[in-house]
Image: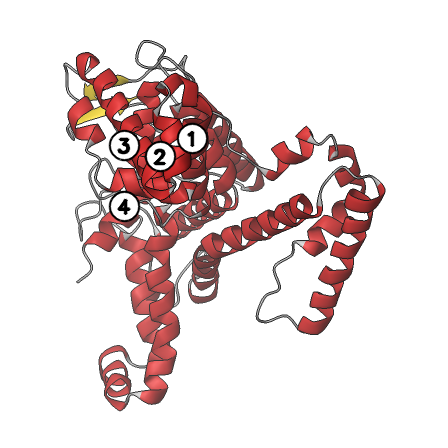
Amino acid sequence: SMTGYSFGFWSFSSYGRSTDNEKKDKIIRRELNEVFSLVSGLYTATDFKQGKKLVANDFSENAEFFQTVFEVGRRFKIMNPDKMRDTYGKLMHLLQDAVNPANCDFEVIIPIKTVHRLLKERNCLPLVERHYREFIIASDVISMDCKDVHFAQEEKKQAKEVLTEIFVRKEKVLTEEQLELCISSINDFHSYVASNSYPVEVMIGHLKNHFSPSAYDEPGKSLEIRCGRGGSCLSHSHSTQYKFVMQSLMLWREIQRQMCELWLLTDADLLDSGNRYRLCNTGQGLNRVQAAPRISSKMRSILGGLQSQLSGWVGLSVVHLGDRDVPNALVFIDKYTQVPRILSPIVRTLERLEDLVQTDERIRNLIDSRFDGLEHSKIYILRDYFRHGFDGSGDDGGSCIDGRLTSSWNWTSKLE
């Protein structure tokens, strides 16, 4: 499969290590040709007859094949951020170089396939708007806590039948396979957003339920931090820290809800042939420093929308992009895909504690003697994270938008 080729050649490619040096210009074209040869070889190994035709031509004559392989890899990563964690960076580095006409004789980039693009190509967007409700129902995710699962399933089935009748049989603007692809893709999107947003939603709930926004009724619930104490680089009163944490979590929640769009904008910024990168030493080795105008604009929009809902903003509103702290859009998107990975272990620990107290007498005795009960043990964990996961610590930490995530990352790295 095309996804298999994307995984296959990057798993043993050393593209970034050889091209990212200060004499890279003479190396890039040779490396690109080696990668194209490698992809062609993998395809030939799986389908000799078609592969034989492929290798008989110049690379430029097989542009459509390479475009498809690279598009599949980029799209697969967006919907599966836990996959290709070692190889996606190599892929994007290669494509950054390949979009430069001086390095590659043919176009290697095509737009990522989306539901919107397919519907637009089939000239049925106005029809979709008229039947928006049916699309929402047909692609809805039925949660485990749904009160009537059977009714929800029947409603989805009926909505799908209505869409099939209109789009496939009556208007004939989509095939049945294309309609199924659209519905399944939208369903995947809803599942993706729900799974990424869930740990952030839970942590917001814990902050609201266990801590007061204005004052604390006992020392064990104080969120106050002081610069220089416990590794903190910021000084906040309890109420200020509460707002700082709440605003940060709300921002992360909104970012997770819009991650698919942010991924597409990242792809566009990285692979813009008119937006070249500079190879610079940022203090963490050589990095590809590149402006990210699309991501910057979207982040300003997200941040502005959130700030308009709040009475005041604690900390800086600076979004680092294309500088020493966040060299390019790839670094940005990689940092924010870590949010669920940072918060999920905390959420699972708090949920698991309740089961352990019921089933493990040793754990129950430890919690009762050390933390004065289950509730206080949860507050102990939450208080430590809400204080020192948002204390401006960590390399390039602080109260800016990027620094908040850096602090949480730093807190997580110290867990033993």
Binning the other alpha carbons within 10 Å of mark 3 as few (below 14), some (14 to 19) or many (20 upward) gives some
Give percent across and percent down for residue 18: 16, 25
Q: Amino acid at mark 1?
A: Thr
- In the rendered view of the protein, which quadrant contains the N terminus? top left
**Element under label 1?**
helix
Q: Earlier in the sequence, mark 1 or mark 2?
A: 1
> Foreground residue, 208 or 361?
361
Q: Earlier in the sequence, mark 3 or mark 4?
A: 3
Q: Earlier in the sequence, mark 3 or mark 1?
A: 3
Reading the image, the residue beneath label 4 is: 407
Instruction: Decide if residue 372 is in sight here.
Output: yes
Mark 3 or mark 1: which is in front? 3
In space, the residues marked 3 and 4 are separated at their CA atoms by 41 Å
Mark 4 or mark 2: which is in front? 2
In space, the residues marked 4 and 1 are separated at their CA atoms by 23 Å
Which residue is at 39% across, 72% downward?
A: 351
> Foreground residue, 80 or 196?
80
Reading the image, the residue beneath label 1 is: 266
Which residue is at 27% across, 81% downward?
A: 367
> Foreground residue, 414 or 92?
92
Instruction: Decide if residue 399 is in sight here.
Output: no
Name the colour scheme.
Answer: secondary structure
Disc 2 + disc 3, Cβ < 8 Å:
no
Disc 4 + disc 2, Cβ < 8 Å:
no
Mark 1 or mark 2: which is in front? 1
Reading the image, the residue beneath label 2 is: 332
